[in-house]
Image (cartoon, rainbow, N blue to C red):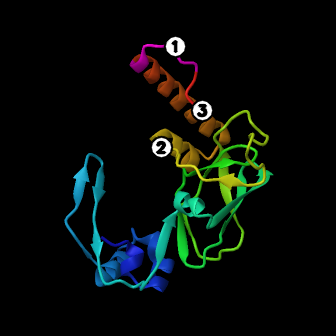
Amino acid sequence: MKAISDCCPRDWCDQNLVSLHNSAAMGLVARYCSSSSSIRVRNLEVFTLVGADQITKRDYLTLSEAMDKHLVRVDETRNVSELKIENLSGDFHVFIQAGDIVKGGQQDRTLITDLVLPPKSGPQPIGSFCVEQGRWSRRPGESAAVFYKSDKQLITMMQRYAVKSVKQQSAVWTEVDKSKKALTMNARKITGKEINSCR
């Protein structure tokens, strides 16, 4: 299975991906790719596009993998809504998915943009929201200047909606709080014990 950008010439994709709903653009996709039968589950329908590779070699890492290998640096800016991120690798592209969480700095943050960070990117600004209401100081044993790998992400549909569509810090906090309360209630039911809070 290939992404549209893997089957279509790169310059065409850069100019036309945003207007794929346009029938002329779809005609160009049809010229470079063929589509398999769709798979439908409730209100989601997926088509796979197949075509010759246009990108000869590109190695990807997730943000978590890259931070684990110390190939990506994320710096605190002391601005809740923006961090600095840099791909230090000379070989790997790093895929960042909206909802990825980084730990540390003045408070844990979730990143709000889907993007591919190229090798040797230099420091780049990236939008963020706080997911840790109340802390604005260094956590013991960590630096307040940088962030560390986290395997956590915003996972519920409403958390992602708060980040990508509502785009308000208060909405993100509300959805994170709802999830904590739901996890606490479930943990109480499973254990039969009083549990104060899930973190």
Mark 1 or 2, which is nearer the eye? 1
Q: Is 23 rendered above or below residue 45?
A: below
Which region shows up in magenta?
190-196
Along the line of sight, which residue is nearer the eye, 56 or 69?
69
Residue drawn where x is 54% and y is 74% of the image:
92
Q: Quadrant of residue 123?
A: bottom right
Q: Nearer the viewer, residue 78 or 31?
A: 78
Q: Residue furthest left?
A: 37
Q: Which mark is residue 155?
A: 2
Question: Where does the image place residue 155, in percent across and percent down from the top left?
Answer: 47, 43
Q: In the rendered image of this protein, does residue 146 appear above or below residue 21?
A: above
Q: For mark 1, what is the residue? A: 194
The image quadrant of residue 53 is bottom left
Query: In this rendering, would 107 be left or right of 119?
Result: right
Q: What is the x, y in percent for residue 66? A: 56, 64
* Residue designated by label 3: 174
**Above or below, comparing residue 106 to residue 40 in the picture:** above
Q: Is residue 112 left or right of residue 186?
A: right
The location of residue 2, given as percent across then percent down, is 34, 73
Q: Earlier in the sequence, mark 3 or mark 2?
A: 2
Q: CA distance from mark 1 to mark 2?
A: 25 Å
Task: First in sequence, mark 3 or 1: give its number.
Answer: 3
Q: Give the camera-side residue of 78 and 173.
A: 78
Q: Main secondary structure of the magenta part?
A: loop
Q: Residue type at mark 1? A: Glu
Which quarter of the image is occupied by the C terminus?
A: top right
Q: Secondary structure at mark 1?
A: loop
Instruction: First in sequence, mark 1 or 2: give its number.
Output: 2
Number of other residues with Cα within 10 Å of mark 1, as a class: few under 14, some 14 to 19, many 20 or more: few
For mark 3, give the secondary structure.
helix
Quadrant of the image occupied by residue 32: bottom left
